Amino acid sequence: MIDPPRPEVKNAVNTCRSAGIRPVMITGDNASTAAAIAVQIGILRGGDTVISGSQLDTMTQKELEQQVHGCSVFARVSPEHKVRIVRALQRNGNVVAMTGDGVNDAPALKAADIGCAMGKGGTEVAKNAADMILTDDNFATIVNAVSEGRGIYSNIKKAVHFLLSCNIGEIITVFVASLMRLPSPLLAIQLLWVNLVTDSLPALALGVEPKDRDVMNRKPVPAGQSLFAEGLWKRIMLEGGLIGSLSLLAFVIGRAFYDLPGTAPAVGRTMTFAVLSISQLVHAFSMRSEESLFSIGVFSNRKMIGAFLICMLMQVTVITIPVLAAIFKTVPLTAVQWLIVTLLSTVPLAAVELEKAVMHRRAKKRSR
């Protein structure tokens, strides 16, 4: 007698394996039946073992911890066995998700890092013990939830990366100018405006960026790993330094070539103001993915396009409309000055895209 698996389960198990997630079957069924099903859906593979409840009764917890990594099927288990298995996996450094529907699954659901109860056929006891309830009682839904979770984590990381690199660029612009005893390249109201423009819509658009295509081909992030691991801090500092340097360069060019000697650096400040804000808007496109912007599609996130156009319009407006220009202490720029601003503002995009190409080339060499 056999209860056949759902057709979508095998693909879900394969997705788990490619994502670095090891599926384990824990069942009350006979060991032979459980092994046959596990082979059919890809859980039990060559070299994996099957452990029965009677064998678990003779094992100490230490012995179970040593053998749990080689076992993919636990058969004829009791509620106590399930808790022991979960704790053995946790002791080996794993983040454990446990599924179940019965009253006897509740202790293991509670002990797991993520308890997933069945919403349709599950008991109220199991639902209350779980962290998540599957409304369709489908294992593939858990895999979809992992994919969505990875996408959310990735987007949070992108937004933090973007905001910190932009703010470091602003700090460097003002701080380095003061060290060089230059006039202030930005007024307080201009800095506040830059933060309003760049920290709002572009950051929100990054938060709804579509998932990367390879999100389920990546290994899980270790539980204790910092958000800034794998060189992220270094990249933030380098990108922030680049944005700040370009803004200072715009100030020097405007002050040296377009401002009259002995007067306030109105053109220099306006060019700095424009470069700092527009370069950050352009930089937001670089933050969308670890892949090249041109491989994922420039227009694939329409919210980002909308955010860019709205913020660009806002930025140009406070420079070109006299009433607003008087408030923000800006002056109209000539076509040549706008060309300089445009060229300087696109440098961060080119630099980050070049960085991505170099990193991917190194990754390919390591994999070979």
Image (tube, grey):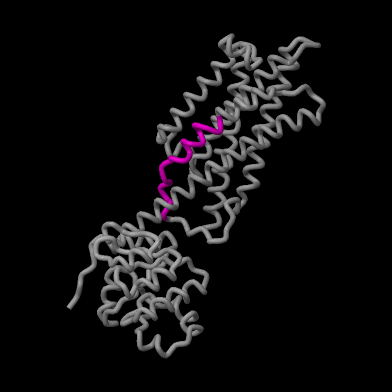
Residue drawn at x 53%, y 37% as measured from the top left: 286
* Along the viewing direction, whichever of 243 and 25 lies nearer the viewer: 25
Residue 123 visible somewhere in the drawing: yes
Residue 341, by quadrant, is top right
Query: Which stretch did the figure color magenta?
Result: 198-216
Q: Magenta stretch: residue 202 in it?
A: yes
The spot of residue 22 in percent (x, y) is 41, 67
Residue 186 in which image quadrant: top right
Q: Position of residue 253 (x, y in %)?
A: 71, 19
Residue depicted at x 37% and y 83%: 51
Which corner quadrant holds the N terminus?
bottom left
Q: Is residue 220 left or right of residue 121?
A: right
Is 325 included in the stretch rendered in magenta?
no
Work out whether residue 46 or residue 198 is closer to the camera in this orientation and state it: 198
What residue is drawn where x is 42% and y is 32%?
303
Image coordinates of residue 103 in percent, x first then y, are 31, 73
The residue at the far left in this view is 1
Q: Can you say whether 282 is above or below 76 in the image?
A: above
| Total numbered badges shown on the rendered structure | 0
Is residue 84 shown above or below 226?
below
